[in-house]
Image (cartoon, rainbow, N blue to C red):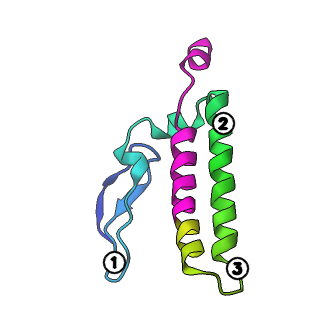
Amino acid sequence: MTRIGKNPISDRVLTKPQRGQAKLVNIVAKVPGLLERAKAPTPKFFRVLRNIGLTLVTVSGAVLAAPVALPVALVTAATYVGVAGGVLSAVSQVTVDDGAKAKK
């Protein structure tokens, strides 16, 4: 392993991937403040949207993992619903309530 620097977020040493390993991207280091945004208070509306998105992902996963043959259109729709639910949940989680943050 070759040392190439330190991660300012967690002080863990980043290393070059060895042959055959996938190169992982540390999103937290590339987007400053992302971890703080994810931990900050979320407005009620976006908490509801986040939960709806998680429900969509769960239903989509159940349809995709069904042990029976399903129509192609249903599997395709479940895939799109899963992606949409994941995006909805991720965006809703990093939405910050500035009023609650200022009160801290």
- The x, y position of residue 84, in whole percent, is 52, 54
State yes or no: residue 93 in magenta.
yes
Image depth: mark 1 or mark 3 in front: 3
Q: Main secondary structure of the magenta part?
A: helix
Q: CA distance from mark 2 to mark 1?
A: 40 Å
Amino acid at the residue labelled 1: Gln
State the extent of the magenta-drawn residues as a range. Answer: 80-104
Classify 66 as above or below 4. Answer: below
From the viewer's perspective, tell me whether residue 66 is left or right of residue 12: right
N-term-proximal mark, 1 vs 3: 1
Closer to the camera in the image, 70 or 61: 70
Find residue 34 and report its horizontal and vertical position in percent. 46, 39
User: Badge 3: few (under 14), some or many (20 or more) residues near its Cα, within 10 Å?
Assistant: few
Secondary structure beneath label 1: loop
Residue 2, given in percent of the width and then of the height, sits at: 29, 68
Q: Which dot marks residue 32?
A: none
Q: Residue at x 62, y 18 (%)?
A: 100
- Name the spot of residue 83 as percent of width and height, x first: 51, 59
Q: Which residue is mark 2?
A: 47
Lower position in the chain sequence, tag 2 or tag 3: 2
Q: Is residue 27 above or below residue 20?
A: above
> Which quadrant of the view contains residue 4?
bottom left
Q: Which residue is mark 3?
A: 66
Q: Secondary structure at mark 2?
A: helix
Q: Is residue 45 left or right of residue 18?
A: right
Residue holding disc 1: 18
Task: State which quarter of the image contains the C terminus.
Answer: top right
Q: Does residue 85 show up magenta in the picture?
A: yes
Which image quarter is the N terminus in?
A: bottom left
| Kind of residue at disc 2 | Arg
